[in-house]
Image (spheres, rainbow, N blue to C red):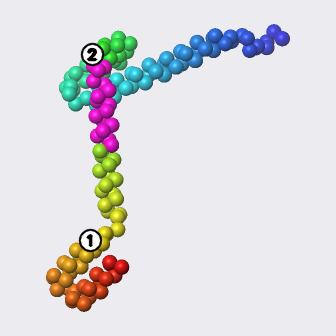
Amino acid sequence: MAGQVLAYDYPLLGAFWTVLWIFLWVMWFMLLFRIIVDVFRDDGISGWAKTGWLVLVLIVPFLGVLVYVIARGRGMGSREIKHAQEQKAMVDDYIRETAAKTAPPSHVDELDRLARLKASGDLTTEEFERAKEKILH
């Protein structure tokens, strides 16, 4: 019995504190990486300012993060929203371009093409009328 580890050797409160500390460390790293991404995403500051913020956040992390959130925290949300809107606009443009390439031509497009062929003399009036009837029915 002397070498046996029992469940009460690690009490429930100890497990709670361990989970709390892991949660706080995960949150800390999420905040740290979000600040680093925000520094590089902001086009309003110069390269030297970005370097300064990065050095401050990496050399003195707790103080650097605290100072950054106090000094520039108000704009972090608006920069994130702006970035999300730009991403959405790019995805929407891509979808429109892709859909336009793969969409079948409409009846109007087909009739326009036939009218151009008739105007150029490649189709006779009878051929134009037959093709138009096929498209419309």
Q: How many marks?
A: 2
Q: Which quadrant is home to the C terminus?
A: bottom left
Asked which secondary structure carries label 2, the reply is: helix
Q: Which residues are magenta?
A: 71-88
Where residue 94 sits: x, y (%)?
Answer: 32, 52
**Residue nearer the viewer, 112 or 84:** 112
Query: Does the magenta-highlighted stretch encompass residue 102?
Result: no
Q: Position of residue 33 (x, y in %)?
A: 39, 25
Name the residue at 30% across, 17% down: 68
Q: Residues within 10 Å of mark 1 (few under 14, many from 20)?
A: few
Q: Which residue occupies the extreme front position in the image?
A: 137
Task: Indicate left or right for 49 with 133 as reference.
Answer: left
Horizontal placement of 18 versus 52: left or right?
Answer: right
Task: Name the foreground residue: 128 vs 62.
Answer: 128
Q: Position of residue 82 (x, y in %)?
A: 28, 34
Asked which quadrant contains residue 60, the reply is top left
Q: Amino acid at mark 2?
A: Ala
Residue under the image location 54 percent in, 19 percent down: 22
- Categorize mark 2 by other alpha carbons within 10 Å: few (<14), some (14-19), many (20+): few
| Relative to 30, residue 60 above or below | above
Q: Residue at the location (37% across, 15% down)? A: 61
Front: mark 2 or 1? 1
> Taking 117 as reference, is 83 left or right?
right
Q: Nearer the viewer, residue 46 or 67?
A: 67
Q: Main secondary structure of the magenta part?
A: helix
The reply to whether discs 2 and 1 touch (Cβ–Cβ < 8 Å) is no
- Does the image show residue 125? yes
Q: Residue at x 26, y 86 (%)?
A: 129
Please give the residue where the numbered disc 1 appears in the rendered image: 108
**Vertical relation: 45 (above or below) 10:** below
Q: Earlier in the sequence, mark 2 or mark 1?
A: 2
In this figure, which residue is indicated by the disc labeled 2?
A: 71
